[in-house]
Image (cartoon, helix red, strand yellow):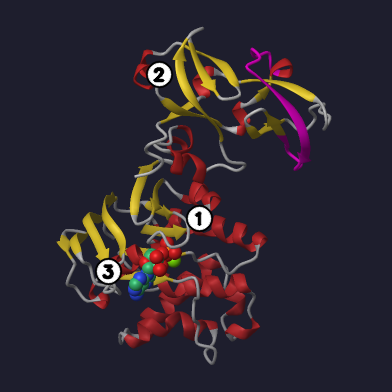
Amino acid sequence: MAGVRLDKVRKVYPNGHVAVAEASFDIADGELLVLVGPSGCGKTTLLRMIAGLESISGGELWIGDRVVNDVAPKDRDIAMVFQNYALYPHMTVQENLGFGLRLRGQPKEEIDRRVAEASDMLGLNERLSSKPAALSGGQRQRVALGRAMVRDPAVFLLDEPLSNLDAKLRLSTRVEIARIHRRVGATMIYVTHDQIEAMTLGQRIVVLNGGVIQQLDTPMNLYNKPVNLFVAGFLGSPAMNLFHGTLRRADGLSLQMAEGTVSLGVTSDALAAYVDKPVIVGVRPEDLQLAEANGVATRLHAHLEVVEPVGNEIFLNMRYAGGEIVSRAPPHSVVQPGTDVALGFAAERLHFFDPETTCR
Ligand code: ADP
Ligand code: MG
C-alpha cells in the first residue's frame, strides 16, 4: 500500500482547456479520500492522471515514495473502477475476477486463493459460475470492484462507481464500499458528484469546482465551516439560506437588507472586517427555527407557503420580503401552510461570506 501526493498537478488539454488548475493534496496510506464536485469540474481528469491514463501538464504526482509522472499505468500499482464497468460477457464471474491475474501470468493456486478471498468479502460466492448477464446491477458492480481487489493494488481509484445503480442499491453498495475499505485498509480515492456519498464515505473530502480545489476538509468541517459560497451551497439539502445585505454596527451587529434590517444577535470582533461592507449571511435550514417552538428570539417574519413532510422531519418552505427561505422542523411540529411565522436562529450558527469571493 502507499499514500499519494499531488504537488501543483495541472492538466491543460490540447485544445487549451484547463481541466485541473493546480491541485495539491496528500492522501495518507490507507485513507479513503473523496473527490466531489459538479459535472465537468475535473474529477475524472484528476483520477485519470493519477492512474496514468492521462498525461500530466505540470506539477508532480507521487505514489508512495516515487514521482510517477512518467511511469506507465501498469507500473503504478493502481486499480481503477469506472462508472461503466465493463465485464467480459462470455466469462463467468470467477473468470472475470481472475482475468487480470491470469494476464499477469500468476500461478493458478494464487489466482484461486485471491478470487475466493474477494468473492467471500463481496458476497459473490453463490454467483461464481454465473455470466454477467444473469447478475443484478449491484452484483455486476461488485464483480468490477472484486476485479480491482484481487490485484491487491497500492491504491484504488473509483470513478462514480455507483451512478448506474438505482437509489436503494446505491445505498447498500455505498455501505459495502465503506466496509471493504475498513477491512482491506487500502488507500482509496473515490470520485462522486453526489454530496451524500461524499459526506458518508469520505474521511476527508476535496471539493472541486471548475478545476480548482475549493476546500479539503473533514465532512463535518465542510458542512459547519464552508470557506466560501460554493462549498456552502454545494453541501446540504435543502441548501443553506442566504441573506444579502450590509453588516452594520447597531444593536450588536445587524444585517441591513433592502427589505429591512435584521438584528443578528452577534457582537463578535471576528466579524469587524465585514462591518459596513456588503455581506452574505448564511443560515442552514436546521438552524432557522420557529421562534416560539424553540424559545429563540424572533429575528424575521415569513409566510409559510408549502409544508413538506418527509417522514423523519418536515421541510417548511417560506417566503419573506427578500425571497424564499426554507427551514427543517421535527416530524410532529404543528404547522399550517398559509400562516405567518416568526423565525429565529442561534447567532453562533450563522455563516458570513464575502460576496466578492463566491468561490476560488
Ligand atoms: P468530471 O469528471 O468532473 O465531470 P472531467 O474531468 O470529465 O470532469 O472534465 C473536466 C473538463 O474537461 C470538462 O469541461 C470536460 O469537457 C473537459 N474535457 C474532458 N476531456 C477532455 C479532452 N480530452 N479534451 C478537452 N477537454 C476535455
Ligand atoms: Mg467524470
Identify the residue at image location x=75%, y=43%: 310
Q: Residue furthest front?
A: 258
Which residue in the structure is indicated by mark 2? 276
Quadrant for the N terminus in the image:
bottom left
The range drawn in magenta is 294-317
Nearer the observer, disc 1 or disc 3?
Answer: 3
Magenta residue check for 182: no
Q: Quadrant of residue 20?
A: bottom left
Q: In which quarter of the image is residue 295?
A: top right
Nearer the observer, disc 2 or disc 1?
Answer: 2
Could you say which disc has been placed on residue 37 in the image? none
Q: Position of residue 264 (x, y in %)?
A: 53, 16
Q: Position of residue 240 (x, y in %)?
A: 56, 36
Q: Which residue lies furthest to the top in this view?
A: 251
Could you say which disc has been placed on residue 16 in the image? 3
Identify the residue at image location x=51%, y=7%: 251
Q: Where is residue 358 in the image (x, y as percent from the top left)?
A: 41, 41
Q: Nearer the viewer, residue 168 or 216?
A: 216
Q: Is residue 44 visible?
A: no
**Disc nearer the start of the sequence (2/1):** 1
Estimate the spatial distance between the alpha carbons at disc 2 and disc 3, rounded to whole Å.
41 Å
Could you say which disc has been placed on residue 179 in the image? 1
Give the secondary structure at mark 3. loop
Give the secondary structure at mark 2. loop
Identify the residue at image location x=38%, y=22%: 274
**Amino acid at dot 2:** Asp
Label 2, residues with CA under 10 Å away: few <14, some 14-19, many ≥20:
some
**Amino acid at dot 3:** Gly
**Amino acid at dot 1:** Arg
CB under 8 Å between discs 2 and 3: no
Label total for image: 3
